[in-house]
Image: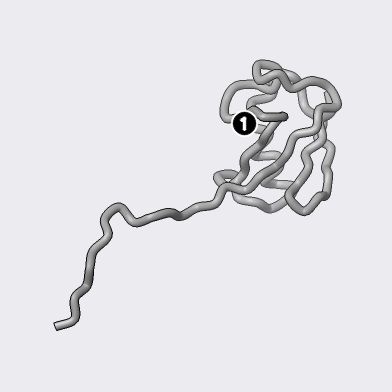
Amino acid sequence: MQIIVTAPTGASTAYAVLPSTQISRLKAMIENQEFIPGDLIRLVNGDDELVEGTLAGNGVEEDEELSLLLEVPGGMRAKWRKKRMV
């Protein structure tokens, strides 16, 4: 089957995969094609994020269009400390 992945820039790329393809394998294919680190890739099908399992198990069908989003690393520090000037 063929699925279409739309990048944040608007560019679309078609991938030939099987329904039994794991989500992690699809992310690796995208990483090799788009040169985006695999841990930053988020795939969204409609309102559902594809995290684990197979494409068929997540309801992805033939000629489906998936949105590729980028994970934003970072956040607040675990413990904020006040530095006082002496």
Taking the view exactly as shown, the residue that stands out farthest to the left is 86
Instruction: Indicate left or right for 34 with 39 as reference.
Output: right
Helix, strand, or loop for circle 1? strand
The image shows residue 46 at horizontal and vertical percentages of: 72, 29
Q: Nearer the viewer, residue 17 or 4?
A: 4
Q: Nearer the viewer, residue 64 or 75?
A: 75
**What residue appears at the point 62 percent right and 48 percent down from the top-left corner?**
70
Residue sticking out furthest to the bottom: 86
The image's colouring method is one colour
Q: How many numbered discs sit on the rendered protein?
A: 1
Q: x, y (%) of residue 17?
A: 77, 27
Q: Nearer the viewer, residue 32 or 6?
A: 6
When asked about the image quadrant of residue 14, the answer is top right
Q: Quadrant of the N terminus?
A: top right
Amino acid type indicated by mark 1: Glu
Residue 53 lies, in percent from the top left, at 59, 22
Q: Which residue is mark 1?
A: 49
Please, is residue 62 above or below residue 81 in the view?
Answer: above
Residue lying at 73% horizontally and 50% vertically, measured from the top left: 8
Judge left or right: residue 78 versus residue 10.
Answer: left
Quadrant of the drawing holding the C terminus: bottom left
Q: Is residue 31 above or below residue 63?
A: below
- Please name the residue shown 78% across and 42% down the image: 6
Residue at 22% x, 68% y is: 82
Q: Examine the image and state in which quarter residue 25 appears.
A: top right
User: Crowding at label 1, few (<14), some or many (≥20) Cα neighbours within 10 Å?
Assistant: some
Please state the horizontal and vertical placement of residue 62, each as a whole percent of the image.
83, 22
Q: Is residue 50 left or right of residue 30?
A: left
